[in-house]
Image (cartoon, grey):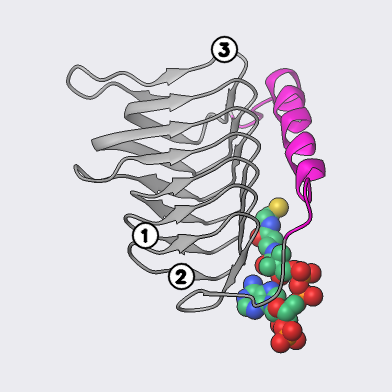
Amino acid sequence: MAIYALDEWEPRIHPDAYVHPDATVIGRVVIGANSTVWPQAVLRGDYGFIEVGERTSVQDGSIIHCTEQHATVIGSDCVLGHAVHVEGATVADHCLIGSGSVVLNGVVVEEGAVVGAGAVVAFGTRIPARAMALGVPARIREGYQVPEGAWQGNVDRYVANGLRYKTGLRRLDG
Ligand SMILES: CC(C)(COP(=O)(O)OP(=O)(O)OC[C@H]1O[C@@H](n2cnc3c(N)ncnc32)[C@H](O)[C@@H]1OP(=O)(O)O)[C@@H](O)C(=O)NCCC(=O)NCCS
């Protein structure tokens, strides 16, 4: 696993979390129980602080960074799809951040909200609870509320997959 201390900062990864050996975690990063971090994901806590709650998946190729001014705080029971970029933003519990989306500094994604695949959420935007933000720049889908628990199945699948990888993954190329 590529897990690095930086100066006095060491990542704190819950023993029940799963971080794939090809993911990179650096510095001031906290990862909660049953969260999962998949191949080529990078969590770089150098300028500031990164926190990931419990049962949240940070999928392949995603990049989580932060600034001195803006920590990145991601809640519990979230799904961060493949190749997501979150930079200095706050994501509350039960959110889906769709694959290939970019969530920029000072953004707040409130509980149960969705950022659609490929969206770019501009600096300082607030996405209300259970809203859906789509497109570039991301706009709220009018008159739509994300059903409660919409992504719990995905959350549970990723928790189970983390357990599976903890025992079942074997490297075959030396
Ligand atoms: C945002 C999302 C959840 C919407 O799903 P949905 O509620 O089933 O929406 P629909 O497919 O019925 O589309 C509704 C409208 O939103 C538009 N839309 C849907 N997804 C969009 C997206 N990512 N970007 C822009 N517009 C989008 C559709 O074109 C449609 O527009 P219309 O009403 O003008 O015809 C889904 O499209 C998405 O992006 N999911 C991300 C999945 C993912 O990345 N998972 C992580 C890997 S596990």
Q: Is residue 1 visible?
A: no
Name which residue lies at 51% across and 56% down.
84
Residue 75 position, x and y percent, is 54, 37
Tell me the residue that label 3 is attached to: 15
> Sequence-wise, which precedes: disc 1 or disc 3?
3
Count of marks placed on residues: 3
User: Residue 90 — which label?
Assistant: none
Spatial separation of the CA atoms under disc 1 and disc 3: 30 Å
Q: Residue furthest top?
A: 15
Circles 1 and 2, Cβ within 8 Å, touching? The answer is yes
* Majority secondary structure in the magenta region: helix
Q: Is mark 1 within 8 Å of ligand 1?
A: no
Front disc: 1 or 3: 1
**Figure quadrant, ligand 1:** bottom right
Identify which residue, 113 or 104, lies in the foreground. Answer: 113
Query: Which amino acid, by three-letter code, is at mark 3?
Result: Pro
Query: Which amino acid, by three-letter code, is at mark 2?
Result: Val
Identify which residue, 38 or 86, lies in the foreground. Answer: 86
> Sequence-wise, which precedes: disc 1 or disc 2?
1
Name which residue lies at 65% across and 50% down.
112
Identify which residue, 165 or 43, lies in the foreground. Answer: 43
* 64 vs 122: above or below: above
- From the viewer's perspective, tell me whether residue 155 is left or right of residue 50: right
Question: From which residue to which does the magenta span run?
Answer: 146-173
User: Of helix, strand and loop, which one carries label 2?
Assistant: strand
Tell me the residue that label 1 is attached to: 104
Q: Residue furthest right?
A: 153
* 149 vs 170: above or below: below
Name which residue lies at 62% across and 15% down.
16
- From the viewer's perspective, tell me whether residue 86 is left or right of residue 123: right
Circles 3 and 2, Cβ within 8 Å, touching? The answer is no
Task: Characterize the local packing of mark 2: few (<14), some (14-19) or many (20 or more) Cα atoms within 10 angstroms.
Answer: many
